[in-house]
Image (cartoon, rainbow, N blue to C red):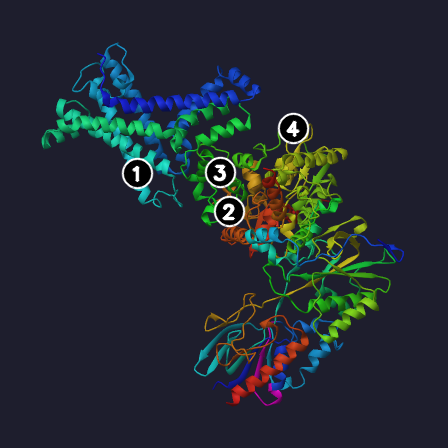
């Protein structure tokens, strides 16, 4: 579809009214603290993995789950060092989100 | 024969002084009790006060026009407040003062930045607090040594000791957003070649003039704003400080190397005051609680009033307004 | 003299079942062992190690020496059952053998000697033996009385939290409690009819004879005794009493240096006696957060009902391992459940100790959040004239231990190798880390280079008089990090250093009995409010002694306690750095 000299790519907007947020509902019911995330980014700043060039991003994962979007972080990269929780101003057990995702994946495999 | 005062005001900060000044002007007998050796509280230390640009000293002077009519006790600790029918006995430094009313205007304590060890306060001399910055301007000294560079970089870290469960603080200290931008502007004024970056979680520029300040800092002073909380500060090479944060708007980690860091420290609740050996009611953050939704200065004890930042973080403007309100309330109570 | 009576059948069934079961299980475990360990068993079986093992079996399985050390009353109770029953069997065997006069008797005639040989018998030492038999029975009954009273007045017995046992355990317990009173009654009734018996059964027999004719009740009593034994033996493999036979095998396996973690884990699972000692001092039990203490968790493990949830809330502070009379390494079991092994040895690095010239320091991921500790270390090492390189100043390195804790062994190994290579590149003479968690991971894993925790290294510097310290008026409370005091078994020495600097005010639970700060990396399942409860408890406990400062040696403990404590918390290195005396 070529118009006016530029190419339109795949649709970029997320239709938030039709995304599937069931995973968020499930995870946030078990860990209600995640609902209180301020998105301040202290967790990702402290994350040694995020700094070494992976896509692992705590803050983003929580938002992606909340919006029902595809998760861009590879949970398997998390080294579970708990630094994110140590610096989190809301005291979230932030690494748990990756832990739950890994658990979910292994359960699905079985 | 013991004389009966109209009001004993605990706290000689701007709230206490404003109220004492008004009451004294109206001929009321007032005693001001101040813990430190000079009056004026925290505000007296500030170099400039937004939005009117007065220095703290000037502002305090404006509040002391009629204070020669009031009794001021400095270096004083309140030992006890006891109720005796319709009056109160306040023991200050062992001496008893009888009074119709008591105003608690104890203000706030500053957050101790040592508690956030990862920010390196007390370890790296180039990490200072917002209070130290004001003091430096007051003393006409430069807060940071930048002799080794032509283009220094500074960072201003917001929300140190505010909205942080790790320091047992859940409240927002309200004024630091504005004060942080003010500090950025001042740094830019003192170090014209510098680049200042503000690291914030949320910028709460709630007033008309504050939004203007923000806009002004962005457009005229080229202050950078990064939405991301600093996780830690370490010492990099050449004595520069290495700051780690995430630019949450871009979703990528950010490393900054700067010549100086200013921590915007928050407000903590003041020391407790006991009436009849019982603590006054407090909210979940430890600040004093008003007992009446309409009258902002009442407590559950008739004759005991509260005003200013001891009720929660407040700007100077708000504090002065609140103190004026309490002066009216006390005046009415005493007349009754 | 061969006699048989059908009442012995329940006992015989039970006995055959339990012996068969244990033999089959042990053979299964032996077959499952890797070749290397099988070889070790054969090499070590006829050595002094076996003798030592038997010594330990006597002191632990029979005398219960470790329980004695913790709690005298409970020690006596356990000993009275174990040693008392053992002596009862041995003495009874001697008695019946002497009576049989050289003939071999079938087992039931040994066990039910009084039934098959009623009345007074005079042979060599018979008077002494019959009194001894009654003495052992009396000891057991006294132990049982304590056990019964303990159920009701458990606080008096020094038990803070009571164990809730499973149904199988309660059946076994009931059977066990019936065995000895029934034996007493059966023997006494027999004595009332035929005479004989010692001070207990004899006297009780005379009393029964005085009351009336007991002939109608005697035979049922022997039946009941046999049934109680039979039931106990049949339930034993499925109850906590399985520890009675298995603990001996576990002790021997350890003595024979069996290193296969799965084998030891299987044996330890069976050897847990569910005594509940691990319950009283577990912070999760004390604060009602989770019932994942070994006493419950191993029970579920045995029944195959354990889930990973049993492991995720645990702090893995090791307090339960330290207090366990059977030395069950519950953390290994938890790690197995999580799908990785921790495999961290106890004790310090075993390399030759050197005061190195060039030291590479590693602060670890947590250590980077405590810059005061790092600054203090720099000051101390500069004063001592040690050349220092901080390996993770610019790079983010990880020892991999947190990943191991959370079940990802392979990535953990990669992380460690990365760290290993980065450290070797700096060519150090020694490696020092300020984090006990990293320390335990790193020790003995660098081929020729010794690894120290900074408390240990500072102590070496002081002992070698490389730095001088000055005493101050400060009072200090030292909090032992669990990774240092329990895992690295390094608990007394930091106190010795601190004693030279200030006055120590130690709480009751200190050293290897230290409380967990609540910050542990392992416990991924704990949320903020639960961690807060744990940290508050420990911070309050440490503040109780009203010392000026709380001192610790772990960045995680420091951060966790500092958040909750009203008193300032400092690292060991900070205290030493403050006390440094400048040299000319």
The residue to which callout 1 is attached is C146
Q: Quadrant of residue C453?
A: top right
- Chain letter for mark 2: C
Seen in the picture, residue C6 relative to B289 is either above or below; the reply is above
Mark 4 and mark 2 residues within 8 Å of each other at the beta carbon: no
Task: Determine the residue positioned at 86% across, 58% down.
Answer: B151
Q: Nearer the viewer, residue B136 or B158?
A: B158
Q: Is residue C472 visible?
A: no
The residue to which callout 3 is attached is C306
How far apart are the two marked residues, 2 and 3, measured between alpha carbons? 38 Å
The residue to which callout 4 is attached is C352
Q: Position of residue B243 (x, y in %)?
A: 75, 53
* Quadrant placement of the C terminus of chain C: top right
For marks 4 and 1, the one nearer the N-term is 1
Q: Position of residue B130 (x, y in %)?
A: 71, 64
The circle drawn on residue C31 is none
- Magenta-span inclusion, residue B31: yes
- Disc 4 is placed on an element classified as loop
Q: Nearer the viewer, mark 3 or mark 1?
A: 3
Q: Nearer the viewer, mark 2 or mark 3?
A: 3
How far apart are the two marked residues, 2 and 1, measured between alpha carbons? 34 Å
For marks 2 and 3, the one nearer the N-term is 3
- Chain letter for mark 3: C
Q: From which residue to which does the magenta span run?
A: B23-35
For marks 2 and 1, the one nearer the N-term is 1
The circle drawn on residue C506 is 2
How far apart are the two marked residues, 3 and 1, measured between alpha carbons? 32 Å
Q: Nearer the viewer, residue A108 or C242?
A: A108
Q: Is residue C450 visible?
A: yes
For marks 4 and 2, the one nearer the N-term is 4
Question: Badge 1 local density, few (<14 within 10 Å), some, or many (20+)?
Answer: some
């Amino acid at each position: 579809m070529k118009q006016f000299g530029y190419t339109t790519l795949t649709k970029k907007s997320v239709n938030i009214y039709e995304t599937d947020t069931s995973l968020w509902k499930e995870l946030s019911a078990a860990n209600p603290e995640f609902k209180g995330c301020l998105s301040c980014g202290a967790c990702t700043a402290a994350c040694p993995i995020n700094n070494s060039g992976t896509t692992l991003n705590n803050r983003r994962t929580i938002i992606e789950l909340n919006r029902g979007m595809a998760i861009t972080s590879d949970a398997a990269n998390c080294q579970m060092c708990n630094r994110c929780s140590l610096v989190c101003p809301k005291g979230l057990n932030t690494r748990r989100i990756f832990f739950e995702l890994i658990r979910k994946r292994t359960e699905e495999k079985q | 024969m013991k004389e009966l005062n109209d009001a004993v005001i605990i706290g000689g900060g701007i709230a206490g002084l404003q109220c004492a000044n008004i009451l004294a002007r109206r001929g009321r007998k007032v005693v001001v009790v101040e813990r430190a050796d000079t009056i004026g509280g925290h505000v007296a230390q500030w170099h400039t006060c937004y939005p009117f640009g007065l220095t703290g000293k000037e502002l305090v002077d404006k509040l002391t026009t009629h204070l020669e009519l009031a009794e001021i006790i400095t270096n004083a600790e309140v030992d006890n407040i006891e109720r005796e029918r319709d009056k109160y006995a306040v023991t200050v430094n062992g001496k008893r003062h009888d009074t119709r009313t008591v105003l608690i205007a104890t203000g706030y304590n500053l957050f101790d930045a040592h508690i956030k060890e990862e920010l390196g306060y007390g370890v790296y001399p180039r990490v200072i607090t917002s209070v130290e910055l004001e003091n430096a301007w007051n003393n006409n000294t430069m807060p940071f040594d930048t002799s080794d560079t032509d283009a220094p970089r500074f960072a201003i870290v917001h929300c140190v000791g505010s909205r942080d469960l790790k320091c047992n603080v859940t409240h927002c200290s309200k004024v630091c957003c504005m004060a942080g931008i003010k500090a950025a502007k001042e740094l830019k004024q003192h170090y014209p070649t510098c680049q200042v970056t503000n690291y914030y979680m949320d910028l709460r520029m709630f007033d008309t003039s504050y939004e203007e300040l923000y806009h002004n800092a962005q457009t005229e002073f080229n202050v950078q704003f990064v939405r991301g909380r600093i996780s830690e500060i370490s010492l990099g090479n050449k004595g520069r400080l290495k700051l780690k944060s995430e630019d949450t708007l871009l979703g990528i980690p950010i490393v900054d190397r700067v010549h100086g860091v200013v921590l915007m420290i928050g407000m903590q609740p003041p020391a407790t005051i006991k009436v009849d050996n019982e603590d006054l009611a407090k909210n979940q953050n430890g600040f004093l609680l008003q007992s009446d939704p309409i009258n902002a200065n009442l407590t559950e004890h008739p004759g005991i009033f509260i005003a200013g930042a001891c009720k929660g973080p407040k700007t100077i403007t708000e504090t002065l307004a609140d103190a004026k309100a309490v002066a009216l309330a006390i005046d009415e109570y005493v007349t009754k | 003299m061969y006699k048989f009576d059908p009442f012995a059948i329940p006992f015989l069934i039970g006995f055959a079942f339990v012996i068969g079961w244990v033999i089959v299980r042990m053979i299964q475990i032996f077959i499952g062992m890797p070749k290397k360990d099988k070889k070790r068993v054969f090499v070590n079986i006829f050595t002094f190690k076996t003798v030592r093992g038997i010594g330990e079996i006597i002191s632990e399985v029979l005398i219960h020496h470790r329980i004695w050390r913790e709690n005298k009353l409970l020690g006596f109770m356990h000993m009275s059952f174990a040693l008392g029953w053992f002596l009862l069997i041995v003495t009874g065997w001697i008695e019946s053998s002497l009576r049989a006069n050289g003939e071999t008797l079938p087992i039931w005639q040994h066990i039910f000697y009084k039934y098959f040989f009623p009345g007074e018998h005079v042979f060599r030492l018979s008077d002494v033996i019959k009194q001894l038999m009654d003495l052992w029975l009396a000891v057991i009954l006294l132990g049982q009385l304590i056990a019964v009273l303990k159920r009701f007045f458990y606080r008096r017995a020094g038990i803070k939290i009571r164990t809730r046992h499973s149904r199988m355990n309660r059946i076994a317990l009931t059977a066990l409690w019936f065995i000895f009173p029934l034996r007493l009654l059966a023997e006494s009734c027999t004595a009332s009819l035929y005479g004989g018996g010692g001070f207990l059964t004899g006297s009780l027999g005379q009393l029964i004879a005085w009351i009336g004719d007991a002939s109608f009740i005697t035979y049922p009593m022997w039946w009941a005794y046999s049934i109680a034994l039979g039931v106990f033996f049949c339930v034993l493999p499925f109850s906590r009493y399985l520890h009675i036979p298995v603990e001996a095998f576990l002790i021997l396996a350890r003595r024979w240096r069996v290193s296969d973690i799965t084998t030891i884990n299987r044996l330890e699972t069976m050897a847990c006696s569910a005594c509940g000692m691990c319950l009283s001092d577990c912070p999760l039990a004390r604060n009602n957060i989770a019932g994942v203490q070994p006493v419950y968790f191993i029970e579920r493990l045995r029944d195959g009902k354990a889930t990973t949830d049993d492991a995720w809330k645990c702090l893995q502070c090791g307090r339960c391992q330290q207090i366990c009379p059977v030395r069950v390494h519950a953390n290994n079991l938890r790690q197995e459940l999580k799908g990785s092994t921790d495999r961290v040895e106890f004790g310090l690095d075993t390399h030759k100790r050197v005061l190195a010239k060039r030291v590479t320091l590693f602060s670890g991921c947590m250590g980077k959040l405590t810059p005061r500790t790092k600054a203090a270390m720099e000051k101390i090492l500069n004063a001592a004239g040690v050349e220092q390189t901080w390996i993770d100043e610019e790079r983010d390195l990880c020892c991999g231990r947190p990943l191991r804790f959370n079940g990802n062994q392979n990535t953990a190994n990669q992380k460690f190798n990365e760290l290993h290579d980065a450290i070797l590149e700096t060519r150090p003479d020694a490696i020092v880390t300020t984090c006990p968690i990293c320390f335990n991971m790193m020790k003995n894993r660098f081929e020729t280079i010794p690894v120290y925790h900074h408390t240990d290294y500072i102590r070496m510097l002081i002992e070698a008089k490389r730095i001088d310290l000055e005493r101050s008026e400060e009072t200090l409370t030292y909090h032992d990090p669990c990774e240092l005091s329990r895992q690295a078994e390094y608990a007394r020495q930091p106190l010795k250093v601190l004693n030279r600097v200030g006055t120590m005010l130690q709480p009751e639970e200190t050293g290897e009995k230290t409380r967990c700060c609540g910050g542990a990396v392992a416990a991924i399942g704990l949320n903020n409010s639960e961690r807060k409860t744990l940290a508050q408890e420990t911070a309050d406990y440490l503040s109780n002694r009203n010392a000026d400062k709380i001192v610790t040696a772990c960045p995680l403990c420091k951060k966790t306690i500092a958040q909750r404590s009203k008193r300032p918390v400092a690292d060991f290195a900070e205290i030493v750095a403050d006390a440094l005396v400048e040299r000319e």
